[in-house]
Amino acid sequence: MEQLNLRHLYYFWVISREGSIARASEVLELAPQTLSGQLATFEASVGGRLFSRERRKLILTDLGRLILGYADDIFALTGELAETLRLDPSERPLTLRAGVSASIHKLIAYYLLQPAMAGERSVQLECQTGRTEDLVLSLKRKELDLVLTDRMPKLQEDGNLTVHPLSGSTMSLYAAPGLAKKLKKGFPESLNGQPLLANATDAPYFERLMNWFSLNGVRMKLVARVDDSALIKVFGSQGYGVFAAPTSIREEVCRQYEVEQIASIDEVMDELFAITRGRKTAHEGVRAIVEAHAENKQS
């Protein structure tokens, strides 16, 4: 079967819902003989009987139940589509397909995406995380509308993509309360020999943090590399070491993970970027994100 006949599938679906060809023929405004012929044609195309008769009732066969499950999903979606198309274009939900670098803290990702969700027009957000390089490739293929990342990509060879610098944040160090209290005294010398949890050792902020440690004569012990911004905080909350996170989300990090801030390091910044296709941003949601955070950067 090279291609499924959706009209035949719809006839089968209505017969299943109505329970008989006679009632389905009334709904579809077709002669019962015509509908029976269409059902027979559909059964031939799928390679088996879809109904059996028991005491003048149509009972779905195993194949019929299998196909009905798909038909329910298909026609539920077509119903939603029909309702959406009845709306004025300005009232239709706007789909925003965003790629977020896995190394970006989830609270920061929410902060970046929120302006698109706060507009007057309803937005259906489709968000995926991954490596910046993979997300940029999906953006080029038009599978995404924008990519949010914490590292400047190499785009010299492709003039179709535009990088928008967004508002960043200084970084702070956090740890479980007992360890944080201990390390606040004599900071930063108190960090020497202490366990360090790295979110991503190739992240730009991590290199800046290592340089800051070096300039201040600090040598910490790297005990884990956790490439997940939420999981690293869980390890930190359980006392396994010190981790870095943006100062801008300090209150939420401390509240949610029951950790304490050791200190803010103003010399270490977590820079953020939005990557879009083309120089002018036509997508309303993308434009809201870029404009909101570009303005914050300038203020």
Image: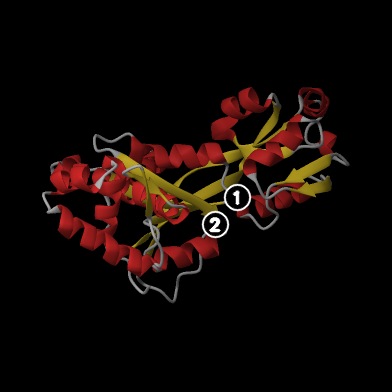
Evaluate whether residue 80 shows in this view: yes
Q: Secondary structure at mark 2?
A: loop
Q: Nearer the viewer, residue 84 or 73?
A: 73
Q: Nearer the viewer, residue 125 or 200?
A: 125
Residues at discs 1 and 2 in contact (Cβ within 8 Å) = yes
Q: Nearer the viewer, mark 1 or mark 2?
A: 1
Disc 2 residue type?
Answer: Arg
Residue 5 in picture, x, y percent from top left: 28, 65
Q: Quadrant of residue 142?
A: bottom left
Residue 203 appears left or right of 23: right
In-front residue for pair 98/71: 71
Callout 1: 10 Å neighbours few (<14), some, many (20+)? many
What residue do we see at 68% from left, 40% from top? 231
Q: Position of residue 12 (x, y in %)?
A: 29, 53
x and y, in percent, of residue 163 in the image: 41, 59
Q: Is residue 279 visible?
A: no
Is residue 296 rendered to the left or right of residue 227?
left
Residue lying farthest bottom?
157
- Residue 138 tag number: none
In-image side of 22 versus 175 (left or right): left
- At label 1, which amino acid type do we have? Ser
Colouring mode (rainbow / by chain / secondary structure / one colour):
secondary structure
Image quarter hosting the C terminus:
top left
The residue indicated by pointer 2 is: 151
Q: Secondary structure at mark 1?
A: loop
Q: Disc 1 versus disc 2: distance between alpha carbons?
A: 9 Å
Q: Position of residue 33 (x, y in %)?
A: 16, 57
Above or below: residue 92 compared with residue 254: below
Quarter holding the N terminus is bottom left
Q: What residue is pinned by disc 1?
A: 103
